[in-house]
Amino acid sequence: MFFLDHIWLIPLFPAFGAAVMFFFGRKLQKQTVSIVCVGMVALSFLWACGAVWQYQGWAEANHHQPFQKVMFTWLGTDTGHMNYTTHDGTLAPFQADAGFLLDPLSAIWLLFVTGVGLLIHIYSTGYMAHEGGYYRFFGYLNLFMFSMLTLIMGNNYALMFVGWEGVGLCSYLLIGFYFHRPAASAAANKAFIVNRIGDAGFLLGMFTIAWYFGSLRYVDVNLLARSGHFNIGDPIITAATLLLFVGACGKSAQLPLYVWLPDAMEGPTPVSALIHAATMVTAGVYMVARSNALFVLAPTSMKTVAIVGALTAIFAASIGLVQNDIKRVLAYSTVSQLGYMFLALGVGAFAAGVFHVFTHAFFKALLFLGAGSVIHAMSGEQDMRNMGHLAKKIPTTYRTILIATLAIAGIPPFAGFFSKDEILWQTWSSEGGAYRILWLVGFITALMTAFYMFRLVFLTFYGKPRMDHEVEHHIHESPKSMTVPLVVLAVCAVCAGWLGWPHSLGGSNRFEHYLDPVFAREAQVFQEEGKEAQLVAGEKEEKHTNPLEYGLMFLSVAAAGVGFGLARRYYAAADKGYAEPIEQAAPPVYRTLQNKYYVDEAYDYVFTGRRKIGDVRLGAMGLGEASSWVDAKVIDGTVNGAGRITRLSGKISSWWDKWIIDGLLVNGLALITHPLSWFARLLQWGLVQWYALVMVVGLVGFVAYYAWR
Amino acid sequence: MEALGQISTLHYLVLAAALFVLGVIGVLTRRNVVIILMSIELILNAVNLNLLAFSRLYGLHGQVFSIFVITDAAAEAAVGLGIIIAFFRNKETVNVDEVDLMKW
Amino acid sequence: MQSHILSIILFTPLLGALLLLFVPKENKHAIRWIANMFALAGFLISLPLVPMFWEQRFEPGFKFLEGGANNWIPSIGAGYNLGIDGISFLLIMLTTLLGWISILSSWTAIEDRVKEYYIWFLVLQTGMLGVFMALDFFLFFVFWEAMLVPMYLLIGIWGGPRKLYAAIKFFLYTLAGSVLMLLGILFLYFNHHTLTGIYTFSIPALYQTAPQIPYHYAFWLFLAFFIGFAIKVPMFPFHTWLPDAHVEAPTAGSVILAGVLLKMGTYGFVRFALPFFPGVVTNPKVRGWMIALSIIGIIYGALVSLMQKDMKKLVAYSSVSHLGFCTLGIFALNSQGIAGSVLQQINHGISTGALFLIVGILYERRHTREISEYGGISNVMPVYATITMIMFLSSMGLPLLNGFIGEFTILQGTFMENRAWAAWAVPGVVLAAAYLLWLYQRVFFGKVTNPKNEKLHDLTPREVLTFVPLLILAFWIGLYPKPFFQILEQPVNQIVQTVRQPNANVNAELPVVHPEIVAQTSQGGK
């Protein structure tokens, strides 16, 4: 049980790496930096493999309970004297552990985060080789790994929040890595602040949980949630889950808080791959999946999750159709795929959502790293309008990107096919078909996905070369440190889906069964209590094959085919000034999509207040201006006014004092006295000794008079 | 000790009166402020002598008061000298005739 | 046997000030060294207090008692009576540390009237420590007022262009508050005599009688204390002296002002207003007003911060926002809220103190605090930029740094009392990120646009040294706050118990939790 007992080392390795970079990074050689940082992540990965492997054995012996390792009491005290009152008047201790938890859910995240993280670290050693701030970059990456692992492995919501904000910070630091570029620093700020809005929701959700359940530990909360004390549709649980979902919307870039993710592409490409595609943005999915016991008690929240997910999926995909920046296409694709995951969670198919997170991590990381390789080859060019005909020149990159595209488009037997198909099928069949409209949304999104991804492939690798000669001359395949991770990821992008080979195609869906200890109990709880199983999690995989399932499967593959065909027709031979089909068919639609539905502008008018409507400024800055005005004029005005009134009354008093009291009464009297006193003044001639003499003479006179009278 | 026993209160009073007159004359006639100050000391000590002499007859109050007077004299000398120095800095003289600032 | 450690801590700075009187004012070097030595000594002497206090952290009542009731001016019942509990202990440690840091930070910043500057600073230090130690209202009031004068002089002599306006505003405003407080104190004093026949200013004695004052008097008394403390905190709408004072004060003055002086208001609430007037503070209407003012302070301070063009003013308004959290926690009236509030006071002292140092460092180099004058400072001052980033993050409440612990505890405590209160306060967390990061973006990111900024030199070792203790504390509180909560546990529970006598089960030995959790944790926690 060596690995399992020291599970706390997994996040601490990269934390150590980050600390080394912080203190000594400036003085270290690039090579040393790579060895330390990549080495730490590799250690984490190996340790994680060991721990997950040992957990298998431990779980067999312990009724598939989650494994917990509590290090110390982090927040609050362990004396039991600092308590708070929960909703029903009982006392609960104010205490959150620094403790780690391992169960199948966190095991999956643990493996792909450390695995993909390791590959991206290796890739970065090549990609960032010629950049300044090398140690800073790797320090941030390691810090990110630490935060992400804390997020995954924490055994309570407070610790999840630590990781949650930590990854947000690292995202901020890495988006703003090129801090001298104004766009990068603005994007970094936007990412952090939008995430903070989500975090505020998370915070309140967490408090609601603490208030309602008296604990923030997952095991406690799940135990209580599953105990049957709470009704389905409990308003407090609904509120808690909705608030948590606000947090998830921020972190996982769902409507309406998705705006930061496309801008986040200002960061270096490996960052986009690691943070903004594979790992961090899936934290919201993790959180909802982790809180599944609560979410199933709140059908309203589930519906919200599903609807928001579906809307985000199609919304982002439609924007992705017309973007020309290769990374932005992928960014919108990520938002869209995250929408899929939430759709799955919302219809109760937790395992399917997690499965899609898992496969998506590989092919989306691969796409981003491939795009990075393309950009590397193109000397920093990101605009696909200036690419073309690269397939021959950078063959490894081309092949791996093609595999990833096939995977994301949902072509069997690549990874994306299994997970996406699972989601669509679950959406179709859940709640007796109540969500079929969402299935349709998902289906259209699948078509769009195939279209924009193949558009990307054709514009980049086929058609006529559209770049400058200078750039064309420099095109070269990336170094081994970059291509090897690509190949490894490509293998995963092909094979990862096989873990969840569905029953209907003769598989056994091992992935889902692995997650049974986390999710399946939900379904059982409902059935045992004899309640109408509105949302049956994970158990919808009928053992018998359903002809409809085959039909839908065929439909989604066909949609991918149609997307491919359309993209090929319009872009396969694109030359300079090629025509955009959407622009030709419906220019207003194209403009709207090109401008991302004007959402950023609308937010700037309404929420941030960076733009004025006429002369009026709304939003936070508008409020700020108004408050500053109130502060200066009204509040401080009152204070200064009080001061002024005091001074005015002082002036009046002093005038009265000077002219009436002093002037009329005192000085007036003196003025009268003055002429009367000229004689007396003669006596005052100013020589002290003469005065003294007069005094003495007078005294002697007095004494003499009384003595000899 | 016989001779001392014959010294009566009157002797003291006479001595004190003599000292007092000397002091007064000094204050009235000298032009140097420092000497005027010293003369004031003489006057004060004459008073002290009187107090002590009478304390023989009327108890310790006189002695207590004479201590107060001595303290007071010291303070007065300090302040007085301070004023003189400040004055000398301004006028470069310690002659009282030059000090007629209080003239109307 | 009495231990005299409190008196020693209290008077070490004053001793330094007395010694400085005898150093010729031309010898600036010696003056600086002596002042720094005494400030450091003041801090080092307070360190032995830590293990001594730790031993008895769970024991009830005040510790390290010194002097006694009525031993100073027996005829009016005033005593030289010192003693501390967990709350004042933490604030004293903060004061000695920040006192040292701010004196260290003014090494090059102050060039004229050096001697007077350090003397007043050390006197101020003694005044502040006295406020936190006094267990006698007369003594307390003496220190409370005594501390005003040095601060007034620090702003008025070594301040910026509008220093006189700021200094007088500060002085009169706070004086107006303390006059009302004095009236309140006198009422309590005579009330105690009426009830017991004894004239005394002893605070423990007044704890016994003050809660018996009927509501219609107690309300006005609370109001008098409230105005005195609210001006000091400062709570909205009594806050406008703060930005002026901060902007005009020298850097070290700002650090002390924000780090310690403001805490006297909140300390006053915790130490006096709550236990003296439990009937008033638990009155829903009064409490509602207090909470409302706190929440307005949080949001409003943050919004005003957002639009500031002067860095120091921005930080000053952020103080209003942060202190809003502190008062919010206090009037949550539960142990979490108050403990969080005290911790947040410490955190605010650490982070905002550091923020003022940060602004001061730039000001010393460029003599301007206009945000638009800067840009791209990261390029020329990387170490400075890094420290600033950490302190900004601490100030905006990022987990694993100190600010988060305080805010989280306060918000959770508030949430347990009323859901809406916490929900209204939470946007302050978002806005904090907005104004701080925007400031960071404008000052540190981008290219160096202003040629005057190209030659700025990075931090000197002395400047780094001023930040080191603050950084250590920021991480310590963020990573392992348990000791702080344990120190606060007893006094806070004590206050909550006093305030909420009817249901005084706060100190119950074992918490009654859901039985399922007990079952689960006993078997699951391997």
Image (cartoon, coloured by chain):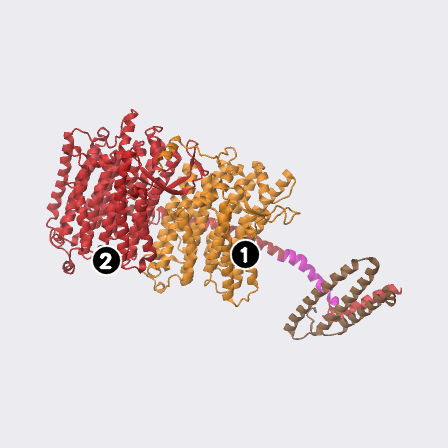
Local packing at callout 1 (Cα closer than 10 Å; few below 14, some 14-19, many 20+) is many
Please tell me whether residue C8 is drawn above or below residue A341 in the rendered image.
Answer: below
Name the tint of chain B in the rendering.
brown
Residue B53 position in % (x across, y down): 82, 63
Residue B7 placement, left or right of A488: right
C428 or A496: nearer the viewer: A496
Q: Is residue A365 visible?
A: yes
- Which sits in the foreground, A119 or C214? A119
Q: Which amino acid does label 1 sit on?
A: Thr
Residue C421, visible in the rendered structure: no
Q: What residue is rendered at 13% in x and 45% in y?
A: A567
Q: Which chain carries label 2?
A: A
Q: Judge left or right: residue C208 versus residue A131.
A: right
The x, y position of residue C196, in whole percent, is 64, 39
- The residue type indicated by label 2 comes to Ala
Q: Where does the magenta region start and end?
A: A658-680
Determine whether the residue tagged by mark 2 lies in a helix, strand or loop.
Answer: loop
What chain is colored orange? C
- Chain letter corresponding to the colour red: A
Residue plotted at (41% across, 45% down):
C405
- Is label 2 in contact with label 1 (beta carbons under 8 Å)? no
Which quadrant does the C terminus of chain C fall into?
Answer: top left
The residue tagged 1 is C12
Number of numbered callouts drawn = 2
Mark 2–mark 1 Cα distance, whole angstroms, equals 56 Å
| Residue A416, quarter of the rendered image | top left
